[in-house]
Image (cartoon, rainbow, N blue to C red):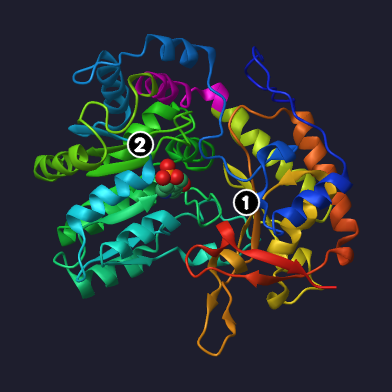
Amino acid sequence: MRTVFEPFRIKSVESIRLTTEDERQASIIEAGHNVFKLRAADVQIDLLTDSGTGAMSSRQWGALIEGDESYAGAQSFFAFEDAVREVFAHRHVIPTHQGRASERLLAGLLIDETKVVLGNTHFDTTRANIEYAGGRGIDLPCPEAADLSSDFAFKGNIDLERLTAELGRLGADRVPFVLMTVTNNSGGGQPVSMANIKAAKRICEDHGVPLLIDAARFAENAWFIRMREQGYHDKSPTEIAQEMFSYSDGAMMSMKKDAFGNIGGLISLNSSEWVEQIRSMLILTEGFPTYGGLAGRDLAALAVGLKEILEPDYLSYRIRSTAYVGEKLDAAGVPILKPFGGHAIYLDARSFCAHLSDDQLPGWSLSVALYVKSGVRACEIGNVMFGRLLEDGSFDWPSKDLVRLAIPRRVYTQSHMDFVIEEIVNLFNHREQIKGMRFRQRPEQLPHFTATFDPID
Ligand SMILES: *Cc1c(COP(=O)(O)O)cnc(C)c1O
């Protein structure tokens, strides 16, 4: 296979401070063995998240200077609106400061104690906003998603049979909308097929329930459809994205992912009735409808980003460069989730650290060891993030204990990733030396952000 090189040149650089293992050992102790509490300057390669961490292009930086900071009716808003409409094609476009603001506005309008939102797999802030409004989020992932190592092409799909059954049981009165998250972030960055979106839309229509899309990684999803689904090989990513959204009644998006934004979000909707009420709330908590919590320059940069993210050369490089990391780790026998998602590679920590029990927090321990050994910061998505403390003091552990290597967009080169691969393979070859961890202090809400830990000797 020919090398797919980064389809960009580097014009401005940011130095990485190199550190020693002794320095990192001191840093992680100070951080309470929690990589979220490290200073970013003490990290060599930061794979904590792909959210808001991408590199803007020179065209985006140019647009930033031209941003129109008028309070109302700014040119930058209309550029933003045009860019969103061209792909999403819903009637109304509302900017917000990030994805969770979109979620809060929609949930505030549509959800109360009687409501249930069905979806393939809700992202954690989505679920939190649904619950905060009094409702409940139910995940209906397809059965193929449960097998971590099979190479089913569309593990992000929703289970259509269960969707039909749940809609039949609950009815339109209790389900304000069905939400399809593309790609399925919490499910390992796995794509959703066009056929699945289309079928879900038909089922929703039969029950009179709107279908919304959580579009954080819609462009990566479009590329997977192009590569893997029959009939789409000759279509452009823009055409595929347009078709995906054509089966929806609206969308919300964190533009910190597939829009090359360091900040930003949106709501795109057909319903004029919903939009009127959301705009009133937007003015109360985010800002005037033509800026929604963002500066004019942010809107201008996002308008350019939305076009760039759909460029075939970029997407081909993006998906290939992520798979490159996965293939090398797989070839070395490192246990990882398959097939490879678009924005991240996931290490299967229970199998990587088979010498640790769930109580010894394998994923968390692996993320700490990886940082200390190599200065690479990754994110546990497992026992600490999702484990539930029971009344008797024991834990209900989640079905998967993963460590996510999220890859920021256009930030690291192949040699950065070669270093990451070498370090993980090296750690895997000495895996029995990875020490387990136990909670020192565990807050009730979102423990992974602020908990502290002690190594088990
Ligand atoms: C990041 C993300 C969100 C939340 O967006 P923020 O911009 O972080 O508030 C919602 N859904 C998905 C799928 C995401 O990845």
Rendered residue at 86%/62% (across/down)? 431
State the extent of the magenta-drawn residues as a range.
299-314
What is the x, y in percent for residue 125? 41, 55
The disc label shown at residue 97, or none: 2
Disc 2 CB within 8 Å of nearest ligand 1 atom = no
Question: Residue flagged by tag 1: what amino acid is it?
Answer: Phe
Q: Can residue 302 be seen in this view?
A: yes
Q: From the viewer's perspective, is 437 left or right of 296? A: right
Is the N terminus in the top left, top right, bottom left or bottom right quadrant? top right
Residue 222 occupies quadrant: top left
Callout 1 environment at 10 Å: few (<14), some (14 to 19), or many (20+)?
A: some
Q: Describe residue 135's horizontal placement relative to residue 20 as left or right.
A: left
Quarter of image, res 392: bottom right
| Image-based side of 39 in relation to 159, left or right | right
Residue wearing tag 1? 36
> Residue 313: within the magenta?
yes
Residue 300 as seen in the image, left or right of residue 373: left
List x then y, in percent, for residue 435: 82, 67
Q: Position of residue 209 (x, y in %)?
A: 18, 57
Question: Where's the C terminus, which quadrant?
Answer: bottom right
